[in-house]
Image (cartoon, rainbow, N blue to C red):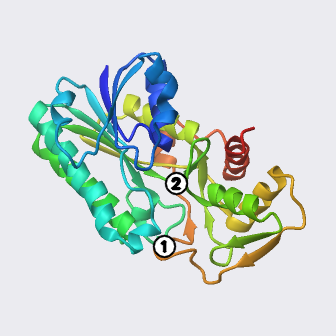
Amino acid sequence: MFVIVTGGAGFIGSHLVDALAARGDDLLVIDDCSSGSRENLAGHIAEERIRFIEQSLLRDGWQELIAGADRVYHIAADPDVRQSAVTPDVQISNNILATHRVLEAMRAHRVPELVFTSTSTVYGEASVIPTPENYTPLLPISVYAATKLACEALISSYCHSFDMRSWIYRFANIIGERSNHGVIWDFIGKLRQNPEELVILGDGRQTKSYLLVQECVRAMQFAVDHADDTVNIFNIGSEDWIDVVSIADIVVEEMGLSDVRYRFTGGVRGWVGDVPRMQLSVEKMKTLGWRPETNSRESVRAAACAMLGR
């Protein structure tokens, strides 16, 4: 297949590119490298397994390059939930407007399929946990989550209006090698600066699901291969959850530290827009034949080791 990957130099995007290149797809990656890195694709670029364009989706010039594509994987987004409470305009542009521009380019060049990465935070503070895909009402509590939900609505409307098909994935916390944000990355950075004390946002009781990025990518491909509705929406995550203090304990252990003091900033949320309790139901994915091979604790430990270079 000839496929486009926006945001393919980022954390999840680069792992997706690995998988697509391994199966022999003809790949064009578009990324402005604002949060990703060309280094994540260095091997593919050097060996000419992919074509890479460093450009923002908010600028023109890339649209004609997608002509003839079979599918677009739209991974590009501003992933900083915390910053969305400070500078919301950036996320509205990089998430909603960029997605609209991708959809318009697809419409103009008759690209029939889109894979989109959304988020568990579209559910807001769900009263049903594990939370299924048909949970309502969807009431996001962060600007980031609101932008992703808006993108979902745009995608659904384009699919029904312009004869497209889409797969929309609502992710739990996806973790692993190449990640440059999130709780594990944050803890490792803090402990390298001060191995005697770790500042933990909130009360440390925030409890959520975590899944390794490699498993996430496998789930994405599995659903594309096994679901063919006009709009296919799936949760992707583990079948359990883990609290922040337990994550801190794992990171401290893997870094070989001891007697680390934990200092909490207080409150039930780590930041404005933080959802303190999240676990997704993956029963819909399981009906297709997929299920996670690792739980949250195993994923956290494996991710910590990978991010520490082991």
Q: Does residue 13 lie above or below 96 as drawn?
A: above
Q: Does residue 302 lie above or below 97 as drawn?
A: above
Calculate the distance from the C-alpha at mark 1 to the C-alpha at mark 2: 16 Å
Q: Residue 225's quadrant in the figure?
A: top left
Name which residue type carries label 1. Answer: Ser
- Return the x and y of residue 115 as percentages of the image width and height: 33, 39
Kindly report which numbered mark, 1 or 2, lies closer to the viewer in this rendering: 2
Q: Which residue is mark 2?
A: 172
Pointer 1 local density, CA inside 10 Å: few below 14, some 14–19, many at least 20: few
Q: Which residue is mark 1?
A: 127
What residue do we see at 17% from left, 51% from top? Answer: 157
- Return the x and y of residue 195 as percentages of the image width and height: 81, 63
Nearer-the-camera pick, 280 or 50 = 50
Q: Which secondary structure, mark 2?
A: loop
Q: Please state if 194 lies on the left or on the right of 169 as rendered.
A: right
Q: Earlier in the sequence, mark 1 or mark 2?
A: 1
- Which quarter of the rendered picture does the N terminus lie within? top left
Q: Does residue 145 lie above or below 72 as drawn?
A: below
Q: Which secondary structure, mark 1?
A: loop
Q: Please state if 27 lies on the left or on the right of 110 as rendered.
A: right
Tag 1–tag 2 contact (CB < 8 Å): no
What residue do we see at 29% from left, 40% from top? Answer: 55
What residue do we see at 50% from left, 43% from top? Answer: 11
Name which residue type carries label 2. Answer: Ala
Numbered tag placed on residue 193 in the rendering: none
What residue do we see at 57% from left, 58% from top? Answer: 182
- Return the x and y of residue 296 as percentages of the image width and height: 66, 52
Pointer 2 local density, CA inside 10 Å: few below 14, some 14–19, many at least 20: many
Residue with the most extreme front position: 193
Q: Please state if 161 lies on the left or on the right of 154 as rendered.
A: left
- Return the x and y of residue 154 as percentages of the image width and height: 21, 54
